[in-house]
Amino acid sequence: MIMALVRATLARSHLPSACRLPTLFFRRQMSETPQLTASISRLRQSGLLKTQGLIGGKWVDAYDGKTIEVQNPATGELIASVPCMGKTEAADAISSAYSTFSSWSKLTANDRSKRLRKWYDLLLSHKDDLALLITLEQGKPLKEALTEVIYGANFIEFFAEEAKRIYGDIIPPTLNDRRLLVFKQPVGVVGAITPWNFPLAMITRKVGPALASGCTLVIKPSELTPLTALAAAELALQAGIPPGALNVVLGNASEIGDALLESTQVRKLTFTGSTAVGKKLMSGSANTVKKVSLELGGNAPCIVFDDADIDVAVKGTLAAKFRNSGQTCVCANRILVQEGIYEKFADAFSKAVQNLQVGNGLEDGVAQGPLINEAAIEKVERLIKDATSKGANVMFGGKRHSLGMTFYEPTVIGNVNNEMLLCREEVFGPVAPLLRFKTEEEAIHMANDTNAGLAAYIFTQSMPRSWRVSEALEYGLVGVNEGSISTEVAPFGGVKQSGLGREGSKYGIDEYLEVKYVCFGNIKEL
Ligand code: ADP
């Protein structure tokens, strides 16, 4: 009975995304642990525990005083309450971003670059506090959270540099008395909606190129993990990003989303999250014909060929599958193993999975934290039940972890086929389904047999095969003999229903720029 109540309490995403009532039975039964008290006091001292939205450079509550509780998924404890804002606050944030656009976009690229660089320095000098915040509100192990802070900060550094390299063109004219120029200009106000799995990096990946190109923003972070976003915004203010250039509103997702969609002042929407919400936002953008970038769900195949180096394949697959408890859109969703290496790989991989220590991310040695909420764990259970009812077998794990809460055992499932729900849906959990294949052609067919097209991985020691297969995969990112490939210097994004546009790299800044052609005519010849 108590576990049922706990589960109901933690099922945050079962509730509508409007502000939730503070009926948290489980949390109220617990007193704050000394670990949380110490963490909160440390964050308060560093000035990074911000619990209000940011509009026009001012920290503000929801106008009607409503709040949302932010919980630690590892313990169920309340970390903080943040405002539950809606359309009015969103409208003010949009106005503020709109009025700041004219001044921010007119600064020299060098000036914008210096402020972004300062922000990068501040993110790095506060990396331990930011990592602590990420682990507290998101659950990933502290070491992984620190990696996210560095990865996230790198986008700001990269785009601080890129700000100075937004070049136009001069086109050879078709008539002698003309000169044809191409300008690149900032799009304008950007609405950025981000998910909970990378509370910092999904924000910096959007804000970096937007600010670098001269755009201003209204950010709506996930209500599950808003504290990291607010802390990053505080550091942006300290770095000299002017009030109004970067606004943060949070609360009622659909109200805020609608305000962004309906506004003619918002010229671009950038979103990372589920395919279902992405489709809604794409169709909602049609009315005002906004530029749209979408980074949506994946269904990553990880193909291990007979000629793979088994150690490299096990290590790479482990990284591609279990990072962030399997909760990333580039996580391996289907592990396709060629029949000649299947048994050997399955054995070595299961042994490696057995060594993953599950626990509270603040504890030493933990490699896998909790899932984000009860809905996530129920999805994993549903998909495993479907697979085992159709003939798959659990090789390791396959149930909730004895730690309770939303901890789930790292799991390996054998004899999976591409028709099982485990392979049709994005698992977003620590479950590695193994599928057998015979030929390279079959593997490519299986890999591409999905509407998603974000990341794919292949393990082979054959150079010709790695070229052939990389080219045949209908995916935006391909890792060859490597399971961890994201970096700020390379383009990240999907094909098919995994999204539109690219983030990071020189390509990422184009998403925030308009191309303007200017024709100078009647230039008299000498
Ligand atoms: P996930 O299932 O990974 O949480 P979602 O797509 O639901 O992914 O959430 C990603 C982001 O989209 C979050 O910030 C969430 O609040 C926001 N969101 C969810 N529904 C809407 C909506 N109708 N309009 C705008 N934003 C939304």
Image (spheres, rainbow, N blue to C red):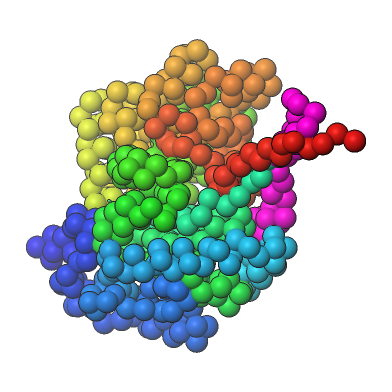
Q: Nearest the camera: 100 or 370?
A: 100
Residue 421 magenta: no
Check the image and name the residue furthest to the left: 1
Would you place residue 392 above or below residue 148 in this image?
above
Would you place residue 273 above or below residue 313 in this image?
below
Would you place residue 278 above or below residue 204 in this image?
above
Q: Is residue 468 left or right of residue 243?
A: right
Count of marks overlaid on the render: 0
Residue located 37% across and 27% down the image: 451
Residue located 55% across and 63% down the image: 102
The quadrant in which residue 211 appears is: bottom right
Q: Is residue 43 left or right of residue 485?
A: left
Residue located 44% across and 17% down the image: 445
Q: Nearest the camera: 25 or 290?
A: 290
Q: Position of residue 123 (x, y in %)?
A: 59, 69
The quadrant in which residue 436 appears is: top left
Residue 374 is at least partly visible in this image: no
Residue 252 is at least partly visible in this image: yes
Q: Nearest the camera: 88 or 350?
A: 88
Q: Which residues are magenta?
A: 155-181
Q: Position of residue 62 (x, y in %)?
A: 29, 75
Q: Position of residue 294 (x, y in %)?
A: 43, 42
Residue 168 magenta: yes
Would you place residue 249 above or below residue 492 in this image?
below
The quadrant in which residue 64 appears is: bottom left
Check the image and name the residue furthest to the right: 526
Q: Position of residue 524 (x, y in %)?
A: 82, 36
